[in-house]
């Protein structure tokens, strides 16, 4: 009886966590997609398309996959039975693979920009980025589809409130699949990310030391470019951390299960649910750290004021104002609205 009560409590915690992540993920990723969509006529940096692709991943996770898990808590069983469980597991696994591969190529692109084309905004142009995005989606599909076709499988895990790859399987073919996936889709991208940022750190320090010794206008310009790119690299590093921190516990659990270790079922499900908070962390950081994105979004909402400074939290504040009747209460009386001529001028 005590065990059933404990499982019920954890199930309730998981339900609220997934509901919270689902709601915030839909709203915040929707903001990112909406803002990009409304600014297609403006110049958007090539790396930003990677962020857009990741926002689409997170939005799809929250709009399609996570609701299946939430419905399972209310119904007591997965919608459509085992099929619903497999659909949920497939989508979460696919979209997680897309995200981590995107982070790896973003890190590589930033390293190449600093070492090969410091004077440019990005080493990759828009065409290269779009081709890479399509390529990484196909790459991720190559590793997420096999469990649907019989090479390993998707199913219940932990305390049966989450679904994923059946990492605890001892079959030889399944173990082979685990090895291929863990190396190709986790350790390899992680190695690329760590290596690139380590080299970025070394190269940027070397340039700063050399420019401080030589001086001159050209050297000063190079130092300024390095400072700008290094700031951009730190921003993308925060995006990487926002994905890896929630997913590392589950990746560790999956690895231990794959090599035959026994893991507490509650811990397995808890790590799986905790990983879902990454769905809203990335767009939240994007809104907080990217000032150009904040300006572009705030210029799109109906209640924009030209004389308001763009604060990191103003993106969420303005979004709430623009979609709810609370805007009547939230709008300061003393702030004048911008005219239609001013809005069109932006």
Image: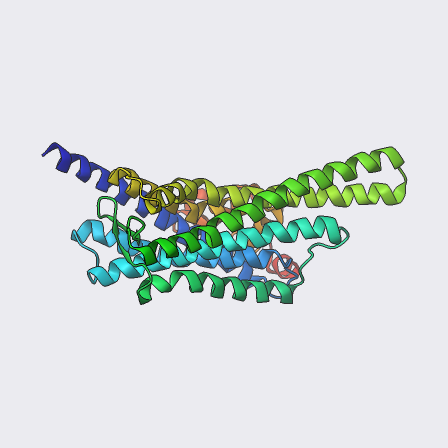
Is 313 located above or below residue 129 in the figure? above
The number of callouts visible is: 0
Quarter of the rendering containing residue 264: top left
Q: Nearer the viewer, residue 81 or 332?
A: 81
Residue 7 position in % (x across, y down) = 19, 38
Q: Is residue 342 left or right of residue 332?
A: right
Residue 237 position in % (x across, y down) = 57, 43
Is 123 located above or below residue 276 in the figure? below
Quarter of the rendering containing residue 152: bottom left
Q: Which of 104 and 13 is in front in this view?
A: 104
Measuring 52% from the left and 50% from the top, which residue is drawn there? 188
Residue 288 position in % (x across, y down) = 54, 43
Asked whether residue 340 is in view, the answer is: yes
Quarter of the rendering containing residue 68: bottom left
Asked whether residue 331 is in view, the answer is: no
Measuring 55% from the left and 41% from the top, which residue is drawn there? 238
Q: In this view, does 319 lie to the left or right of 230?
A: left
Is 121 located above or below residue 37 in the figure? above
Q: Nearer the viewer, residue 253 or 175?
A: 175
Residue farthest left in this picture: 1
Q: In this view, does 74 lie to the left or right of 321?
A: left
């Amino acid at each position: 009886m005590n065990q059933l009560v404990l499982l019920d409590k954890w199930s309730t915690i998981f339900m609220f966590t997934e509901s919270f992540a689902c709601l915030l993920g839909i709203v915040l990723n929707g903001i990112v997609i909406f803002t990009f969509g409304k600014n297609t006529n403006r110049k958007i940096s090539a790396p930003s398309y990677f962020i857009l692709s990741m926002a689409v991943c997170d939005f799809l996770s929250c709009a399609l996959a996570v609701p299946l898990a939430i419905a399972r808590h209310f119904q007591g069983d997965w919608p459509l039975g085992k099929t619903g469980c497999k659909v949920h597991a497939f989508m979460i696994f696919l979209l997680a693979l897309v995200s981590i591969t995107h982070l790896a190529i973003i890190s590589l692109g930033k390293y190449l920009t600093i070492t090969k084309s410091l004077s440019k905004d990005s080493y990759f142009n828009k065409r290269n980025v779009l081709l890479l995005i399509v390529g990484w989606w196909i790459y991720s599909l190559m590793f997420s589809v096999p469990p649907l076709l019989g090479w390993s499988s998707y199913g219940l895990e932990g305390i049966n409130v989450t679904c994923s790859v059946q990492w605890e399987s001892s079959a030889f073919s399944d173990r082979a699949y685990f090895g291929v996936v863990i190396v190709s889709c986790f350790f390899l991208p992680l190695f690329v990310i760590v290596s690139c940022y380590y080299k970025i750190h070394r190269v940027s320090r070397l340039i700063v030391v050399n420019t401080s010794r030589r001086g001159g206008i050209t050297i000063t310009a190079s130092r300024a470019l390095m400072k700008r790119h290094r700031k951009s690299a730190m921003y993308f590093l925060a995006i990487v951390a926002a994905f890896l921190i929630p997913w590392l516990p589950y990746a560790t659990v999956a690895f231990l299960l794959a090599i035959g270790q026994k893991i507490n079922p509650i811990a397995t499900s808890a790590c799986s649910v905790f990983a879902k908070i990454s769905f809203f962390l990335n767009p939240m950081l994007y809104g907080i750290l990217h000032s150009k994105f904040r300006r572009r979004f705030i210029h799109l909402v109906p209640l924009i004021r030209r004389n308001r400074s763009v604060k990191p939290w103003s993106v969420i504040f303005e979004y709430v104002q623009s979609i709810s009747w609370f805007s009547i209460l939230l709008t300061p009386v003393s702030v004048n609205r911008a005219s239609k001529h001013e809005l069109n001028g932006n």
